[in-house]
Amino acid sequence: MCRLRILLNRRLFVLFSLFGSLSLLIFIFYANKWFLNYHYTNCFMSAKQFSKTDNYSFINNNNAHGTDSNIKPYPVVVYNRIPKTGSTSLINLVYQLIEENYSHTHVIHLNISSNKHYLNRVNELYLIDNLTHWTSMHPLIIHGHFAYINFIKYGSLFNPIYINMIRNPLDRLVSYYYFLRYGDDYRPYLIRKRMFDIVTRNQTFDECVLVNGSDCSPQLLWVQVPFFCGQAAYCRIPGNPVAVETAKRRVIEDYLIVGLTEEFDKFVDLLEILLPSFFTGAHNLISRSKDKWHLRRTNYKLPISKATTKIYQDNPIWQAEQEFYNFVRTEFHTILSALQGQFSHQPLSKFSALYKEKINFDKIRPKFGA
């Protein structure tokens, strides 16, 4: 009888323990859900839920939660970074500056599923609404491998600052080709997808071109133009001259600055001048540790032959990408020249202060009865 009572007590104890643990887990779950909903309502709204919304909140006076408050005037920078252009170096620089400047800037990586570069219309709306109203994360730099997104097209009054950096198109393709086979010094132990087959891995870029391999196809050059052209279908057609013209227009009208991988240091200097709230101290930081900021060097890469270069130069896709690259390079150098001028003996990081002295605001009273 005593043993039976002890057994029953043990079972009751186990039962109450399980019930208590389950209650605690339920409480934690709903408390966490309440916290997320309270602080990040828009950010955790699914695309499916968003598509059922009658009126998108950014159309109604940028009102996120039914209050009268407007969007906070903190800047949001969008960096739709292009693979193999040195973007990792720039993002690492941003993180280091945040630490050194004790900045409240947030940096978020946007990753589209399956490493796609394009969004459908519903997901575009979802992303725009989230970025518009995620004011608790402003000031913000959002980066990722995705094509340009037009916020104004959807009626949003919020318009972020776009920046980017591009590279010589053929150099970028060659770098990516060897990156898939040998990786880089940033994550040297990560296995890349062309490392398993020894024959494929050891094939040089020149050899790939001779056998019309898929990894060196001219179609793969078509990356930088569509990243600037945007989400439209015509932007994805390799060599499309209309896409090239659209990409050029984006650079002029929608991007604050587009730099060159080959002139990384000068690009960073311009960012410090144009976006001081994000890049103050960048010039000095790079000067102190120059080698540190040229990250992600491919572990092994061979130069290509003149014959291979000639094959690409005769291809209309290369010609379209190269035309765009030359256009951006000209614009970049024009901006540099405008800043340098007579102050060429001064460090670029000091140009901002020099030019502020040249701008005056005057009030001129007209003379009546003269």
Image (cartoon, rainbow, N blue to C red):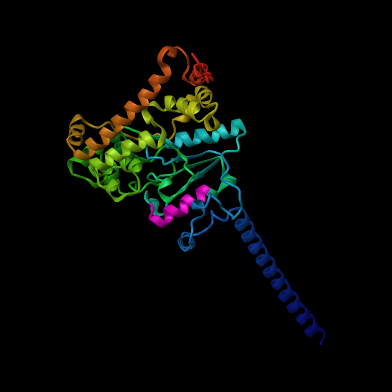
* In the displayed structure image, the side of residue 17 where residue 261 appears, left or right: left
Which residue reaches farthest bottom? 1
Q: Quadrant of the N terminus?
A: bottom right
* In the displayed structure image, the side of residue 229 where residue 47 appears, left or right: right
Question: x, y (%) of residue 181?
Answer: 33, 42
Q: Residue at x 34, y 27 (%)?
A: 331
* In the displayed structure image, the side of residue 31 where residue 198 appears, left or right: left
Instruction: Please identify the quarter of the rendering in which residue 238 is found.
Output: top left
Question: x, y (%) of residue 303?
Answer: 27, 31
Which residue reaches farthest front? 369
Q: Residue at x 54, y 36 (%)?
A: 95
Q: Nearer the viewer, residue 149 or 5?
A: 149
Q: Nearer the viewer, residue 198 or 158?
A: 158
Give the prevailing secondary structure in the magenta stretch.
Answer: helix
Q: Residue at x 45, y 12 (%)?
A: 345
Question: x, y (%) of residue 53?
Answer: 49, 61
On the question of residue 175 being in view, the answer is no
What segment carries the magenta color? Answer: 119-132
Which residue reaches farthest right? 2
Q: Is residue 190 above or below residue 257?
A: below
Question: x, y (%) of residue 126?
Answer: 46, 54
Q: Nearer the viewer, residue 237 or 8?
A: 237
Q: Is residue 230 above or below residue 276?
A: below
Q: Residue at x 48, y 17 (%)?
A: 347
Residue 339 is inside the magenta segment = no
Q: How many marks?
A: 0
Instruction: Please identify the quarter of the rendering in which residue 310 is found.
Output: top left
Q: Nearer the viewer, residue 135 or 177?
A: 135
On the question of residue 118 being in view, the answer is yes
